[in-house]
Amino acid sequence: MDYQEVKRNIQNEFLLAKCIFGGLPLGIGSLMIISSPVEKSTSSELLVFGACAATFGLYWIRKLSGRLRERLALYDLLEKKTYAWYRSAHPESAQAGRVSCHQCGSRKINVRGLGSHTYHCQHKCVECGHTLFYSPELSA
């Protein structure tokens, strides 16, 4: 899996969403605020609706930016914390194909799918709850 390509696709999707859900209301709201002094009869309504639309646009831009940072951080983690990384970082905990927790020494490891279209599994210690590493899901 090419993580750089996945990250680029995620960035492009979020950029499109920011333009639609944030940029359009922000632009329309700004135009309403700017044009409110010109339209004397409805200037207060335009000012209020423009401020609401601009605030709505800024809210969505900020919310989507935060979600983008979270998704990119998750893919950075998936790319870094692999079984090969765990084996090299904790050789005493990954011997002869058997994995144990490097914190508590337990061999009880739970494997669960992460979901959210990551197509990865999380390997987590049942005893202490520490996440050991991530691996790609196996396709049937």
Image (spheres, rainbow, N blue to C red):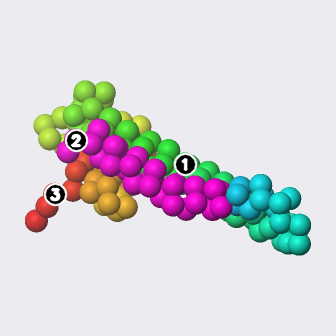
On the rendered structure, is 111 left or right of 104?
left
Residue 47 place in picture, x, y as percent: 82, 63
The answer to whether any part of residue 38 appears in the image is yes
- Residue type at the position of mark 2: Asp
Residue under pointer 3: 138
- Mark 2 or mark 3, which is nearer the start of the sequence? 2
Q: Element at badge 2?
A: loop
Q: Element at badge 3?
A: loop
**Dot 2 crowding, Cα within 10 Å, few <14, some 14–19, many 20+:** few
Residue 7 in the magenta stretch? The answer is yes
Asked if 96 appears above or below 26 in the picture, the reply is above
On the rendered structure, is 85 left or right of 37?
left
| Residue at image point 51% right, 61% down | 20
Residue 7 place in picture, x, y as percent: 34, 44
- Comparing 67 with 47, the one in front is 47
Closer to viewer: mark 1 or mark 3 = 1
Residue 34 place in picture, x, y as percent: 77, 55
The residue stretch that appears in magenta? 1-28
Residue under pointer 2: 2
